[in-house]
Image: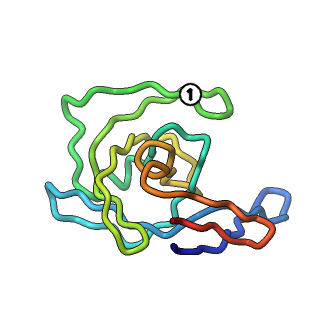
Amino acid sequence: MSKFPYTALPTASGIPVLKPLVGIRLGFKKTHKITPKILALIDSGADVCFCDSNIALWLGVNFKNKKTFGFTAADNQTFQAVKETIALYVDGKEYECDFYFSDTLPRHTPIILGQKGFFDHFKVSFDLKNNEIELQ
């Protein structure tokens, strides 16, 4: 069991908003590259895990001849993503996880941890009142 504080992010109004972010690392076995720690959004509304395409480029992921998948975001915008299996390092453990890479993710949340790939490995408790996220 691990607890993480919510992270305050700036907004256009100047009033910070608290987000459930957790520090993770991603690795690509084919290139043996592992990212430094990156804050990822824990998103119970996301069906799968998403990651910014720039991180894939850094890891050395090759998307040539890969199938493209279509998704619809919460704001009803559609976008395309390409799937690759990546090592997800969180809370001192490693998990194999399918990530969908896209160049349309918000700058402040380049990684989104969704139901399949993250929530299926953890029991996640959101406790905004006490400013903590718990992973079991």
Q: How is the image coloured?
A: rainbow
Give how far across and how far down residue 70 sits, in percent: 45, 25
- Who's the residue at 22% across and 65% down the image? 33
Location of residue 49 (image quadrant): top left
Residue furthest to the left: 30
- Who's the residue at 45% across and 45% down the image? 50
Q: Which residue is mark 1?
A: 72
| Vertical arrangement, residue 11 with respect to residue 36, above or below | above
Q: Is residue 16 left or right of residue 54?
A: right
| Vertical arrangement, residue 68 with respect to residue 31, above or below | above
In this orientation, which residue lies closer to the viewer: 88 or 52? 88
Q: Residues within 10 Å of mark 1 (few under 14, many from 20)?
A: few
Give how far across and how far down residue 31 sits, in percent: 15, 59
Q: Is residue 111 left or right of residue 101?
A: right
Q: How many marks?
A: 1
Location of residue 102 (image quadrant): top left
Q: Amino acid at mark 1?
A: Thr
In this orientation, which residue lies closer to the viewer: 47 or 61? 47
Location of residue 14 (image quadrant): bottom right
Q: Is residue 93 left or right of residue 48?
A: left
Give how far across and how far down residue 76 sits, in percent: 65, 27
- Who's the residue at 48% across and 57% down the image? 122
Give how far across and how far down residue 99 sits, in percent: 37, 45
- Who's the residue at 68% across and 32% down the image? 75
Mark 1 residue element: strand
